[in-house]
Image: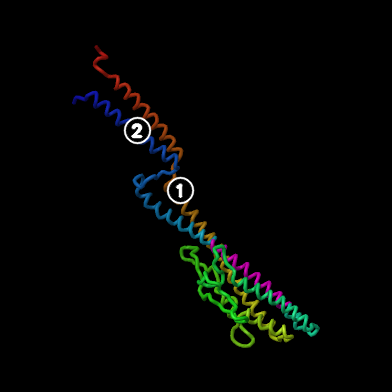
């Protein structure tokens, strides 16, 4: 078979192009540190990589959700801690006001401070998060949950829902408590339930007319204990978030190790291959240069 000079040159060009493409592929692998750049590089490995990457992405989102849940729960915990402190002060003042050694004017003065305490409790019950959403409104987070209208009548406009956040494949966590469970549904000495606001308001009104109460401390203690119970539940949620964060971190580590074993590049082998490919390309270039110089005129 006769091979023309043109054919020989074309074969040389094709050889250089093939070697150059292989070299470029190796350079890309070295640049990314990955053996599998596209599914065709390893179809079997690629089918394992995709679900692992999706799992890592999902868990990363769970971690973000956990951070957001923790932040909102921290705000709720801070507000309830303040409520507890206010109730403690209110109980101290009621003990003082109920003393026989306190006169009518002193009770009026105590009532003034108690009104401030009541206003502070209402403000804490209407606390918001960084997004302006009310912490104790249930699912109705965009509406002011507690109002007083008319004076002495306290209304709850939230609902009894709880917002949940996904922190794991099969785990959700509540990031708030409905305000009626925290501030409204409190056992009352007069029977049934009553809000801590109403209980304190009625005591203040009586105190302003020099009337004390023998059961006010029991009612305030019930409110105090209820807030402590809600705070305990918050603490349990914090622990759950921390446990799932540790579990998620371990799952991510295992998944990333598996991914590494499938798609990571053997750097030593790739560098060695790169050197061989460079030598091969240089040899192809030299051979092509020699073929280009072949001509019948060189022998005349």
Residue 82 image position (x, y, % from top left): 66, 70
Q: Earlier in the sequence, mark 2 or mark 1?
A: 2
Element type at marker 1? helix
Q: Residue furthest left?
A: 1
Q: Nearer the viewer, mark 2 or mark 1?
A: 2
Q: From the image, which quarter does the C terminus lie in? A: top left
Which residue does the image show at 42% across and 47% down from the upper left? 263
- Residue 19 is marked as 2
Q: Is residue 1 magenta?
A: no
Residue 70 to residue 103: above or below: above
- The residue wearing badge 1 is 260
Residue 180 to residue 6: above or below: below
Q: Residue furthest top?
A: 300
Residue 20 to residue 178: above or below: above
Residue 149 image position (x, y, % from top left): 59, 79
Image quadrant where residue 224 sits: bottom right
Element type at marker 2? helix
Residue 207 image position (x, y, % from top left): 72, 83
Magenta residues span: 68-92
Q: From the image, which quarter does the N terminus lie in? A: top left
Q: Main secondary structure of the magenta part?
A: helix
Image quadrant where residue 278 sits: top left
Nearer to the camera, 50 or 202: 202
Which residue does the image show at 68% across and 77% down from the upper left? 115
Residue 157 lies left or right of residue 42; in this view the side is: right
Q: Residues within 10 Å of mark 1 (few under 14, many from 20)?
A: some
Nearer to the camera, 288 or 67: 67
């Amino acid at each position: 078979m006769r091979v023309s000079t043109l054919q020989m040159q074309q074969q040389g060009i094709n050889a250089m192009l093939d070697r150059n493409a292989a070299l470029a592929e190796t350079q890309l692998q070295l640049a990314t540190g990955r053996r599998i750049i596209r599914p065709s590089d390893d179809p079997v490995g690629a089918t394992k990589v995709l679900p692992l990457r999706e799992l890592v992405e999902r868990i990363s989102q769970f971690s973000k959700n956990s951070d957001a849940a923790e932040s909102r729960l921290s705000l709720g915990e801070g507000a309830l801690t303040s409520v507890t402190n206010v109730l403690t002060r209110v109980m101290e003042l009621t003990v003082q006001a109920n003393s026989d050694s306190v006169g009518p004017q002193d009770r009026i003065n105590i009532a003034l401070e108690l009104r401030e305490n009541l206003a502070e409790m209402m403000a804490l019950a209407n606390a918001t998060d960084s997004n302006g959403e009310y912490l104790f409104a249930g699912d109705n987070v965009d509406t002011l949950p507690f109002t007083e209208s008319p004076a002495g009548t306290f209304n709850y406009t939230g609902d009894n829902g709880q917002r949940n956040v996904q922190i794991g494949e099969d785990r959700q966590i509540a990031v708030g408590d409905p305000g009626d469970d925290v501030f409204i549904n409190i056992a009352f000495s007069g029977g049934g339930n009553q809000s801590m606001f109403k209980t304190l308001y009625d005591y203040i009104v009586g105190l302003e007319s020099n009337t004390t109460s023998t059961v006010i401390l029991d009612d305030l203690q019930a409110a105090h204990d209820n807030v402590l119970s809600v705070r305990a539940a918050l603490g349990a949620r914090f622990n759950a978030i921390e446990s799932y964060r540790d579990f998620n971190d371990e799952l991510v580590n295992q998944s990333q190790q598996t991914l590494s074993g499938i798609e990571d590049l053997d750097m030593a082998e790739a560098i060695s291959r790169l050197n061989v490919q460079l030598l091969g390309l240089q040899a192809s270039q030299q051979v092509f240069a020699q073929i280009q110089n072949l001509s019948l005129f060189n022998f005349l």
